[in-house]
Amino acid sequence: MVNICMLRMKKPEQLTSGEFTTRVDQPFCSQSVVNLRRDNMETKMKEIGVANVLKSYNWNTRLLKCVGVWPLQIYDPIFLFFFLYLSIHCSLTFAHLIFSPKTVDNVVSNISENIILTMTLTKITITRINRESLGKLLIDVKEDSLSEKYKSKDEKEIFYKYTKLPPRFILTAVIAMTVAILLYYVNGLKIGLQIGN
């Protein structure tokens, strides 16, 4: 390839700062440099895409194993603990909503507390019920993302573009959930301290 470029230029070349140039300091075979950069970029995109898929897969594995609902490895004691805890908590907050005085403050605080817990209970229950189909889907997604089964170059680029989103979403969701949990328990602690004083 270098010889072809030399023949086209019909000038002697030398290697300076990682790039072939002619003695008159013009870029030597700039199309070859562009092709090399494009090939390097595609390789880096593929590596980043696969790394993002594996990163989001590993994060999901860790987070869902903590609750006991990872579809590829269900752990019943942890799931039952969280299921019973959330069921009792949601039942008691619904009972409080029904039997407490109907002031705006009571209703709003009860509903805002109970919505998050009810959503969490619903999500872990649905994940537990659909664990077999979710397990098959996760295996297929992991195999497809790690193998080259793309119909076109555009499909591959779209896949790599969207693999950037899950790690960001998971990180944002975990941070938001942690802040919500901390605020919930700090608020309860603050109320308890105010009552104690």
Image: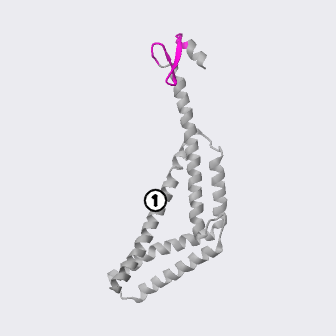
As drawn, 157 above or below 129:
above
Q: Is residue 164 left or right of residue 57?
A: left
Q: Is residue 18 left or right of residue 3?
A: left
Q: Badge 1: few (under 14), some or many (20 or more) residues near its Cα, within 10 Å? A: few
Q: Residue at x 58, y 72 (%)?
A: 125
State the residue position of label 1. 172
Residue 118 percent coordinates (x, y): 49, 75
Q: Is residue 181 left or right of residue 132?
A: left
Q: Nearer the viewer, residue 23 or 146?
A: 23
Q: Residue at x 63, y 54 (%)?
A: 141
Q: Which residues are magenta?
A: 8-26
Q: Residue at x 52, y 16 (%)?
A: 14
Q: Is residue 154 visible?
A: no
Residue 151 percent coordinates (x, y): 62, 42
* Picture quadrant of residue 111: bottom left
Q: Is residue 105 visible?
A: yes
Asked if residue 152 lies in the magenta stretch, the reply is no
As drawn, 62 above or below 109:
above
Tag 1 secondary structure:
helix
Residue 146 percent coordinates (x, y): 64, 48
Q: Mark 1 is on which residue type?
A: Thr
